[in-house]
Amino acid sequence: MGKIRKTYTKEIKLKAINLYINDMGIRSISKELGIGYTTIQRWISHYKSEGVQGLEEKRGTSRSQFKGRPNKDYESEAEKINRLEAENAFLKKLLAAKRGMLKEKKNR
């Protein structure tokens, strides 16, 4: 699995930017706020290129209609019950097959 990045509020990002603008070094800002050096560098870069809007959270927002999961059609209660019953039956068969394989290994 990948790293889980922490999400910071826009206020914290603006505080870091203001400290940078007031001639504080990036490493000093990093130590004071307890945030990684490269994270603050990224915020400054986004701020310089896009302004305050560059500090908004962009993760999870797709710009393309073809990205992400397709919209799922809502199923009726009867369809949902049928689907869940089929899943249940499949899992029971899978469990039985797995138990059968374990018994065969023990008998050998």
Image (cartoon, rainbow, N blue to C red):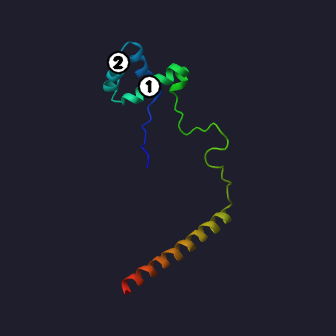
Q: Position of residue 67 (x, y in %)?
A: 63, 44
Q: Residues within 10 Å of mark 2 (few under 14, many from 20)?
A: few
Please name the amino acid that badge 1 sits on: Lys
Q: Position of residue 54 (x, y in %)?
A: 53, 25
Which of discs 1 and 2 lies nearer the camera? The answer is 2
Farthest-out residue, top: 22
Q: Disc number at residue 63?
A: none
Q: Which is more toward the observer, 74 or 43?
A: 43
Please name the amino acid that badge 2 sits on: Gly
Q: If you read the primary sequence from the N terminus, does the residue marked by circle 1 or circle 2 appear first? A: 1
Numbered disc total: 2
Residue found at x 41% / y 79%: 102
**SS label for mark 1:** helix
Residue 26 lies in quadrant: top left
Q: Position of residue 18 (x, y in %)?
A: 42, 17
Q: Disc number at residue 25?
A: 2
Residue found at x 42% / y 37%: 6
Q: Which quarter of the image is occupied by the C terminus? A: bottom left
Task: Give the alpha-carbon distance from disc 1 to disc 2, as whole Å.
Answer: 15 Å
Residue, disc 1: 13
